Amino acid sequence: MTDTQTETTNPTGVTLTDFAAGKVKALLEQEGRDDLRLRVAVQPGGCSGLRYQLFFDERSLDGDQVQGYDGFEVVVDRMSVPYLTGASIDFADRIDAQGFTIDNPNAGGSCACGDSFH
């Protein structure tokens, strides 16, 4: 799939693995609300310059890009899309690691904890 196809079929540029999507859906069901979406954003900060933010959000911001999944939506603000295009989100559930992980081909380097990148 070319970058153009990715942008056309997925305006957020971010994809979730099946396991991550299942985890998001389960967490939303626990919240008991149907007005929340998973927001993925890039903000200045962290030891490498930029840091990822993943959180449930009820807001709709001007320029948000939205991708529908089975039972929920992922939203990325317009400023974060260029940093996240091609990124894949997974969920680790191992003894040594648990939580969402982001594999981002745009990151030139990252910190040891994986929470920030440049």
Image (cartoon, rainbow, N blue to C red):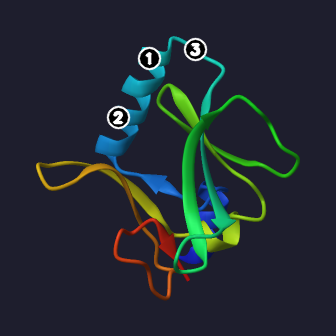
x, y percent for residue 13: 59, 62
Q: Which residue is drawn at 48% across and 23% down?
A: 28
Q: Name the residue under label 1.
A: 29
Q: Which of 111 and 39 is in front in this view?
A: 111
Considering every residue shown, the one lying at the far top of the view is 32
- The residue shown at (60%, 56%) is 9
| Of residues 63 and 68, the one drawn nearer to the viewer in this rendering | 63
Q: Is mark 3 on a helix, strand or loop?
A: loop
Residue at the location (55% across, 71% down)? 46
Residue farthest to the front, as pictured: 47
Q: Are marks 3 and 2 in contact (CB under 8 Å)?
A: no
Residue 10 in the image: x percent, y percent?
Answer: 60, 55
Left or right: residue 99 compared with residue 49: left
Instruction: Give x and y (percent) for residue 58.
Output: 71, 28
Q: Tell me the kind of residue under disc 3.
A: Arg
Circle 2 — which element?
helix
User: Which amino acid is tagged 2?
Assistant: Lys
**Gap between marks 3 and 2 measured at Cα:** 15 Å
Dot 2 surroundings within 10 Å: few (below 14), some, or many (20 or more)? some
Q: Name the residue under label 3.
A: 33
Q: What element carries label 1?
A: helix
For marks 1 and 3, give the CA distance: 7 Å
Compare residues 100 and 111 and report the one nearer the observer: 111
Q: Which residue is more in the foreground, 17 or 54?
A: 54
Task: Kindly identify which numbered label has been placed on residue 23.
Answer: 2
What's the residue type where badge 1 is placed? Glu
